Amino acid sequence: MLLPYREAGRVEAGCDEAGRGCLAGAVFAAAVILPADFKNPDLNDSKQLSEKRRYALRPVIEREAIAWAVGVVSPEEIDRMNILRASFLAMHRAIERLGVRPEHLLIDGNRFTPYPGIPHTTVVKGDGKYLSIAAASVLAKTYRDDYMNELALEYPAYHWSDNKGYPTQAHREAIRTHGVTPYHRKTFALLPEERQLALFAW
């Protein structure tokens, strides 16, 4: 059972990201402040939920949350700063868009760039431990999926409506056949042979 908060009596925001391991598309993050008495037996780490369940939960979270927001960092920004820093920046952008300022942040993962003026706690696999992080994971995932579905209409050959930009075989075959798009992360090893060449050069 997921925990409602880390410390009672303070305003906590859970934060999580989606799309870190993708070859294409922006990285998304969400920040969610839930009421202390929030309960929903269906809410869990978004990776453990079906797509249908995630989309069913999204309006519930948005309606019942004290505050929620989504932050986005573009592929171009990812290439400039690296994906780890971009993931933290996406969380910062979500936090700064919250209508209520949290007193503490619960961050999914083991590292984070501190947000000015707000203490934080990193929680490994936090989306399976705290309701607010799980809620953030659902929002980040569904909003990013919406975005990738839109990009798939522009570039159908890459099967983004199915793979959401992750490195599937179909996605990589499309890169071999059609090349890269403006949405691909150019600093990533988009094909396995690129990684082998880089290691050989090293």
Image (cartoon, rainbow, N blue to C red):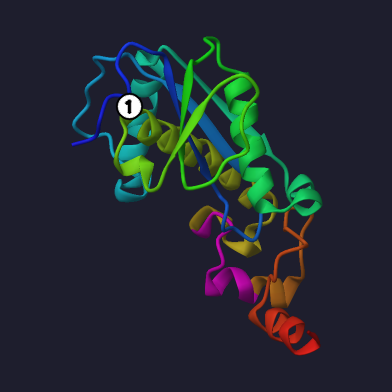
Q: Residue furthest bottom?
A: 200
In the displayed structure, 1 sits above or below 68; it is below
Near-viewer residue (170 or 128): 128
In the displayed structure, 160 sits above or below 55; it is below
Toward which corner of the image does residue 33 lie, by quadrant?
A: top left
Could one spot residue 90 in this view of the protein?
yes
Residue 166 is covered by the magenta coloring? yes
Near-viewer residue (158 or 201): 201
Residue 186 in the image, given as x and y percentages of width and height = 78, 62
Instruction: Name the residue at 50% across, 16% down.
Output: 102
Instruction: Name the residue at 47% across, 41% down.
Output: 141
Secondary structure beneath disc 1? loop
Left or right, 78 with respect to 40, comes to: right
Residue corresponding to mark 1:
6
Q: Which residues are magenta?
A: 163-173
Dot 1 amino acid type: Arg
Toward which corner of the image does residue 58 lie, by quadrant?
A: top left
